[in-house]
Image: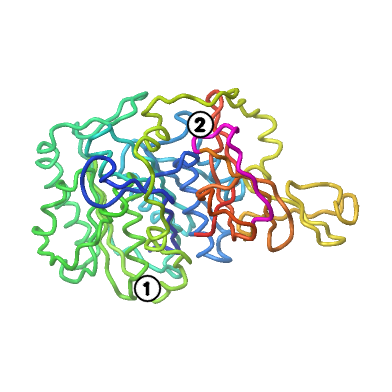
Amino acid sequence: MSGILSYGAYVPYYRLTRKAIGGGRGERAVASYDEDAVSMAVEASREASRALGDQAGGIDSLIFATTSPPYAEKLNAAAISAALDLPASVRSFELGSNTRMGLAGLLLGADLGAAGKTSLICAGDVVIGGPGGARERDSGDGGVAFVTGPEDQAIARILGQASSTTELLDVWRLPGDQFARQWEERFGIEILGPVSIDTAQRALSAAGVAPEHLSTVILDATNRRDVAGVPRALGLKPEQLADMLAENLGRCGVAHAGLVLANTLDTAQAGDKILVLSTADGCDAVVLEVTDKIASGRPSRSVQHWLGSANNELAYNTYLKWRGVLPFEPPRRPDPDRPAAPIMKRHEHWKYGFYGSRCESCGQGHLPPQRVCVKCRSVDAMKPERFADEPCKVTTFTLDHLAYSLQPPVISTVVDFDVGGRLACELTDADPGAVKIGNRLEMTFRRFYTGQGVHNYFWKARPQR
């Protein structure tokens, strides 16, 4: 048997109100111009790793799920592994092409957990819909992560699961296309409705749990009407159905079932039984039981915390520019240079792992890592130190209106870390008018830019959320 050991979630700072799009209530989460599926998966995984505590070093496998991979042919999970400072011996897998793969990754991790292995499953998606369409309006961006392993340390044990695979043309996107296409939705409802009901019933049978004993039921689908018949077929009461976060988040592709599960675990009590169902080209379902260890695996920031930490003043044209849908006048500056592969590899621990150095003679921190101490001038008396999770503050800053950016002005800042060490870096997710010396900050993994087909990832600072 196996289960979930810890979990974490991440919701971007920006929101686009549906009123700004052209109608509807609520808002959708929007990944910033410097975020993508990889960076959001890293943020969620950091939350899950912190919740796991001392056991975080025992990860055997990394599973990454997305339908919006930054690279079509390259292991995107490698960047996640490097940013999380996982050992090179950790096996990495990627799942994609279907929004059901987020929950499928969790089930794969559960199977590995039954074999005694500990896995980190992370999912992230940037969902783009055609302007004015339902997919643009109802979708969202976000990331989620779970650590799975043997049952004895689980905060939620797996009681049973079931899967179905169905070949049908419902939602699809060809290589090179920006927007997905969808067949007439009644066709999907007619096929996937019975499949969802059957899969849910088989999962409950495998778990030995009656529908009336479920505390929460999570019904995720590309089209919510695909699973609309499940509650009636199972005889569920309205209070058993989870809030699918449609009004203040939107459906976040492969990450959505996991995000709603994380939101449920944030307030769950020992003994609660949860059914999670994800439908797309078939269906996956899993039944979980919350254990008395639930408090030990919760992250410090809940899903509701992330939803409450937001800026909903994003303009619609800015959103379209960020997603590459709307052509715009570029700044009169040279295009960014392509990052050089040898240099990136040479400085991997600094660029991805965010390792600096600390002088063993006087304790001075250095970012980037140095051989010679700037304080006591000792040579080669350094030890590597990871600064990614260390808080810091603004020491000085400037607003640069000339530098290349999709969100000018660039906020260039010098930050001092509480543990010692100083770094010149960019500040993101911040109101330029609200930046002040002394503001509390934290580090976040971002995609700086893309030059000639190469994504340049590094760390920025952001106001503490």
Question: Between residues 274 and 208, which one lies in front from this camera angle?
Answer: 274
Q: In the rendering, at what x and y percent does residue 349 appear? A: 67, 45
Neighbor class of circle 1 (other Cα within 10 Å; few <14, some 14-19, many 20+) is many
Q: In the rendering, at what x and y percent does residue 166 appear? A: 20, 38
Q: Which residue is mark 2?
A: 74
Residue pictured at 20% horizontal, 63% vertical: 241
Question: Which image quadrant for residue 449?
Answer: top right
Residue 420 against residue 34 in the figure, above or below? below
Residue 19 against residue 151 in the figure, above or below? above
Question: Between residues 414 and 150, which one lies in front from this camera angle?
Answer: 414
Evaluate whether residue 211 shows in this view.
Answer: yes
Question: Which image quadrant for residue 253?
Answer: top left
In the structure shown, which secondary structural element does the residue marked by tag 1 occupy?
A: loop
Question: Between residues 16 and 367, which one lies in front from this camera angle?
Answer: 16
Residue 257 against residue 72 in the figure, above or below? below
Residue 41 is covered by the magenta coloring: no
Evaluate whether residue 162 shows in this view.
Answer: no
- Left or right of residue 101: residue 77: right
- Left or right of residue 314: residue 82: right
In the rendered view of the protein, which quadrant contains the N terminus? Answer: bottom left
Residue pictured at 65% horizontal, 42% vertical: 351
Q: In the rendering, at what x and y percent does residue 416 appear? A: 70, 57
Residue pictured at 29% horizontal, 72% vertical: 272
Q: CA distance from mark 2 to mark 1?
A: 38 Å
Tell me the number on the disc at residue 291.
Answer: 1
Residue 406 is covered by the magenta coloring: yes
Question: Between residues 142 and 92, which one lies in front from this camera angle?
Answer: 142
Residue pictured at 44% horizontal, 70% vertical: 152
In the structure shown, which secondary structural element does the residue marked by tag 2 occupy?
A: loop
Magenta stretch, residue numbers: 394-407
Q: Amino acid at mark 2?
A: Lys
